[in-house]
Image (tube, grey):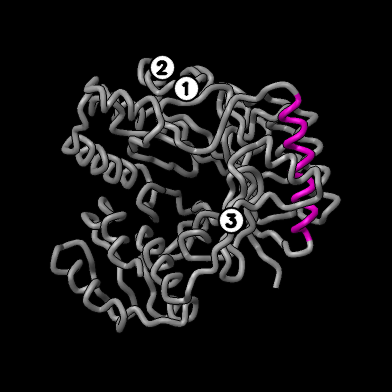
C-alpha cells in the first residue's frame, strides 16, 4: 500500500534565528537551483510508493524559494501524480511571502499555510533574530486571505528571554484577533550550538521556569476562551464542522500522523522518514545532498530498523503528546503490543503523580502531565 504522507525539507533561511537548531542556512550562488533539481530527482525516486493524503513543506523557509523554483517543484509533483492531497501545508516567513507567491501556491492545491510569527513584540523579534516585522505579519496574513486560504496556522513562542507575561498576553490577543484556524505555541528550548544557548551559558539571562509554567497555563486558558481546542501539547485548532472528540476539524493531519506513529517519506537535506518499520535520515549537508542525487543516488545518511517493542514505546511516547492520549485498541492494532500489560506500572506511576488518567479504553495525561509531556513520554521508551 502506498505511503500517504510526504515531508519535504527546504533548508534555506534569509538568516539563522538565535534559537534555531534545525538544519538550515542562507542561500548562496546556484545552491537553491541545485537543491530544487535534486529534490525533484528524489521525488521521482519515491513517487511510485506515494499516494499523498498529507504533504508538508517545512524548513528552513520554504517561502524563500522564488516563483520559478516553486513552478519547477509544483510542475514535477503534477507530472508525478502527487497533487490533490487532502491537506497540503507550506511553512512561510512573513518576510518572504508575496501576493504572487501566495496565488501560485493556492492555485496549485496548497490549502494550508503555517506562518512563523513567534511574537508581535518588535523588541522580541529582534532578540530572536527574526527577519520580519510586526507589519509584515499583518500584510502577509492579508495576502493569504485575499487569495483564498481558509486554513492558516500561526506559530508563537513563549518564555523568550526578557518576555513578560504582559508581552505574551498581548501577542496572544493580537494573534487570536486575526482569527487563524490554528495556533502552534512553543516554549523556547535552549539547544546547543545556538546563540541563545551561548547567551544563557554566559549568564546574560536566567531561565524562569515558574514564569514559563504560568505562560503555558495562560495559553491553554486563553486559547480555550477564544474557541481553540488543544489537541496536542503545543497545538490548538478551531473545531468547525463538528470534528471528532480527538481531533478538531482544523488540526494538522500531517502532524497527527507523526504522533500516531504513521508512515511518511521524508525528502530533502536532513529530512527523516519512516516507512514500513525502517527509519531513514538524509545527509544534513545541502551540497552533499545535491551531489548524491546528481549521481542518481538517494542521499540517505543512515537507516535504522527498530525492533517492534522499541517502536511501540516510541509510538506511545509520541501519542502521549496528544490530549486524547493512547487508545488501547488502536495501540495494539498499530504496534501489536498491549499497553495494559507491558506499561501497566508506568501508567500507574503517572496516575499516582497526578500526571496521568487511566480510563477503561485509553490512557492520557492530565493538564499537569501535558505540561511536562516529554518527561512522561520518556518513561514509555523501551
In the rendered image, residue 370, in percent from the top left (x then y), is placed at: 28, 55
User: Circle 3: is it few (<14), some (14-19), or many (20+) Cα within 10 Å?
Assistant: few
Marks 2 and 1: CB-CB under 8 Å?
Answer: yes
Instruction: Give the Cα distance between marks 2 and 3.
Output: 37 Å
Q: Which residues are magenta?
A: 30-47
Of tags 3 and 1, the one toward the viewer is 3
Distance from disc 2 to disc 1, alpha carbons, whole Å, reads: 6 Å
Residue 7 included in the magenta stretch of the image: no
Residue found 21% across the figure and 76% down from its top: 345
* Contact check, label 2 and label 3, Cβ < 8 Å: no
What x and y, as percent, mark residue 341?
A: 30, 84
Return the disc, 2 or 3, that comes first in the chain's sequence: 2
Residue 126's disc number: 2
Viewer-proximal residue among 264 and 250: 264
Quarter of the image containing the N terminus? bottom right
Mark identifier at residue 302: 3
User: Alpha-carbon neighbours of circle 2 within 10 Å: few (<14), some, or many (≥20)?
Assistant: some
Q: Which mark's residue is nearer the viewer, 2 or 3?
A: 3
Residue under the point 65% across and 54% down: 6
Where is residue 327 shown, x and y percent of the image?
Answer: 39, 74
Label 3 with label 1: CB-CB less than 8 Å: no
Q: Secondary structure at mark 1?
A: loop
Q: Which residue is mark 1?
A: 130
**Visible residue check, residue 79:** yes
Image location (x, y in percent) of residue 115: 53, 34
Q: Quadrant of residue 160?
A: top left
Is 106 drawn above or below residue 304 in the view shown?
Answer: above
Assign a secondary structure to mark 3.
strand
In the image, residue 293 sits, relative to residue 35, either above or below, namely below
Could you tell me which residue is drawn at 73 percent across and 39 percent down?
290
Q: Which type of secondary structure does the marked residue at label 2 adopt?
A: helix
Amino acid at each position: 500500500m502506498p505511503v500517504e504522507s510526504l515531508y519535504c525539507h527546504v533548508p534555506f533561511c534569509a538568516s539563522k534565528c538565535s534559537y534555531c537548531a534545525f538544519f538550515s542556512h542562507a542561500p548562496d550562488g546556484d545552491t537553491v537551483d541545485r537543491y530544487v533539481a535534486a529534490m525533484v530527482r528524489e521525488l521521482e525516486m519515491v513517487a511510485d510508493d506515494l499516494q499523498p493524503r498529507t504533504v508538508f513543506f517545512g524548513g528552513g523557509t520554504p517561502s524563500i524559494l522564488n516563483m520559478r523554483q516553486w513552478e519547477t517543484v509544483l510542475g514535477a509533483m503534477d507530472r508525478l501524480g502527487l497533487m490533490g492531497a487532502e491537506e497540503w501545508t507550506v511553512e512561510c516567513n512573513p518576510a518572504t511571502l508575496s501576493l504572487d507567491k501566495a496565488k501560485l501556491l493556492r492555485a496549485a492545491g496548497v490549502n494550508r499555510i503555517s506562518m512563523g510569527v513567534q511574537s508581535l513584540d518588535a523588541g522580541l523579534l529582534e532578540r530572536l533574530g527574526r527577519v520580519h516585522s510586526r507589519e509584515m505579519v499583518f500584510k502577509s496574513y492579508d495576502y493569504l486571505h485575499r487569495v483564498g486560504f481558509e486554513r492558516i496556522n500561526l506559530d508563537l513562542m513563549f518564555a523568550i528571554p526578557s518576555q513578560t507575561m504582559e508581552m505574551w498576553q498581548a501577542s496572544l490577543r493580537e494573534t487570536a484577533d486575526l482569527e487563524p484556524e490554528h495556533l502552534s505555541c512553543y516554549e523556547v528550548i535552549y539547544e546547543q550550538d545556538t546563540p541563545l544557548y551561548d547567551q544563557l551559558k554566559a549568564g546574560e539571562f536566567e531561565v524562569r521556569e515558574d514564569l514559563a509554567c504560568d505562560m503555558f497555563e495562560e495559553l491553554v486558558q486563553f486559547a480555550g476562551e477564544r474557541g481553540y481546542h488543544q489537541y496536542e501539547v503545543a497545538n490548538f485548532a478551531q473545531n468547525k464542522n463538528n470534528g471528532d472528540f480527538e481531533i478538531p476539524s482544523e488540526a494538522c493531519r500531517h502532524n497527527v500522523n507523526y504522533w500516531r506513529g504513521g508512515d511518511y517519506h521524508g525528502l530533502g537535506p536532513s529530512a527523516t522518514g519512516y516507512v514500513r518499520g525502517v527509519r531513514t535520515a538524509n545527509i544534513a549537508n545541502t551540497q552533499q545532498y545535491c551531489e548524491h542525487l546528481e549521481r542518481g543516488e538517494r542521499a540517505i545518511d543512515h537507516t535504522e530498523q527498530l525492533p517492534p517493542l522499541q517502536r511501540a514505546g516510541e509510538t506511545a511516547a509520541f501519542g502521549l503528546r496528544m490530549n486524547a492520549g493512547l487508545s488501547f485498541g488502536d495501540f495494539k492494532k498499530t504496534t501489536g503490543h498491549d499497553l495494559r500489560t507491558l506499561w501497566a506500572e508506568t501508567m500507574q506511576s503517572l496516575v499516582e503523580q497526578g500526571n496521568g488518567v487511566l480510563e477503561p479504553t485509553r490512557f492520557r495525561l492530565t493538564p499537569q502531565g501535558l505540561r511536562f509531556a516529554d518527561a512522561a513520554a520518556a518513561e514509555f521508551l523501551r
